């Protein structure tokens, strides 16, 4: 596995202003264990989508778990985007992994395994809480273990975590998706968005999204 981009060590990245103590973060994350599971588990390579399948607008986000600007978008903009466009049936939102480092790759794999078991809404809550606690687990002395602990608190067993991170098919899928995004849309940074086939880079505000989505 190789990475075409590197976000640098955690200390080099902008720290999100939401500063949660790890204990509070872990407690909140534990609530995910009670999420309602779908009747039939899916596959970790299935597309993760919020919104109605036949929504006229498709918004695709390419993001990295360790990207502070992605945290900004997820915490500040996505809730309003859901309220204005996704939950109203006007748009569907697709999560696409674009890991900038090995820690982000592991997070992407764990998130997809969780989505396969518990569905896209549980996935969205898992991502939200990881982004809220991004400073804690990315700067931990053992960040991979901290990430695994978060997955345990979200309802994944130790055996499922080990099987997930050893899943070479899933790892290859994420890497191939990343390469396709680079070739097809020229994506080089996160977050980047593709709206009905056109790429926009950067953590746009809800006002920017509203303007883009209202354009004919």
Image (spheres, rainbow, N blue to C red):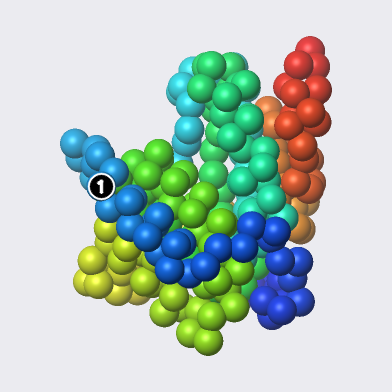
Residue 131 position (above or below residue 216): below
Q: How many marks?
A: 1
Circle 1 residues within 10 Å: few <14, some 14–19, many ≥20: few
- Name of the residue lying farthest toward the left: 39
Q: Identify the residue shown where x is 75% and y is 23%.
A: 210
Q: Identify the residue shown where x is 40% and y is 55%.
A: 28
User: What percent of the width, then of the height, locates residue 32?
Assistant: 33, 50
Taking the image as drawn, is residue 33 in sight?
Answer: yes
Q: Mark 1 — residue?
A: 34
Q: Nearer the viewer, residue 207 or 190?
A: 207
Relative horizontal placement of residue 93, taking residue 26 as reference (left or right): right
Q: Identify the residue shown where x is 37% and y is 60%.
A: 27
User: What percent of the width, then of the height, locates residue 161?
Assistant: 31, 69
Relative horizontal placement of residue 195, taking residue 27 as reference (left or right): right
Q: Identify the residue shown where x is 31% and y is 66%.
A: 152
User: What percent of the width, then of the height, locates residue 52?
Assistant: 46, 22
Image quadrant containing the C terminus? top right
User: What percent of the width, then of the height, locates residue 162?
Assistant: 30, 74
Q: Nearer the viewer, residue 184 or 207?
A: 207
Residue 143 position (above or below residue 122): below
- Name of the residue lying farthest toward the top: 216
Residue 51 position (above or below residue 171): above
Secondary-structure class at tag 1: helix
Residue 21 position (above or below residue 145): above
Which quadrant of the figure has residue 41?
A: top left
């Amino acid at each position: 596995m190789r990475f075409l981009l590197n976000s640098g060590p955690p200390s080099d990245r902008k720290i999100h202003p939401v500063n949660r103590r790890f204990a509070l973060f872990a407690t909140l994350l534990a609530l995910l264990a009670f999420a309602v599971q779908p009747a039939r588990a899916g596959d970790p390579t299935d597309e993760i989508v919020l919104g109605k399948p036949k929504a006229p607008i498709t918004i695709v986000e390419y993001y990295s778990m360790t990207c502070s600007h992605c945290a900004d978008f997820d915490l500040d903009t996505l809730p309003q985007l859901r309220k204005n466009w996704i939950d109203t049936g006007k748009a569907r939102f697709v999560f696409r992994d674009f890991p900038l480092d090995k820690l982000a790759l592991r997070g992407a794999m764990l998130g997809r395994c969780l989505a396969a078991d518990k569905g896209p809404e549980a996935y969205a809550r898992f991502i939200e809480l990881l982004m809220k606690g991004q400073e804690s687990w990315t700067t931990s002395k053992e960040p991979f273990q901290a990430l695994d602990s978060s997955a345990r608190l979200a309802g994944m067993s130790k055996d499922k975590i080990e099987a997930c991170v050893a899943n070479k098919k899933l790892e290859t899928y994420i890497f191939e998706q990343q390469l396709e995004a680079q070739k097809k849309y020229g994506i080089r940074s996160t977050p980047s968005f593709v709206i009905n086939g056109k790429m926009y880079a950067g953590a746009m505000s809800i006002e920017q999204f509203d303007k883009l989505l209202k354009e004919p």
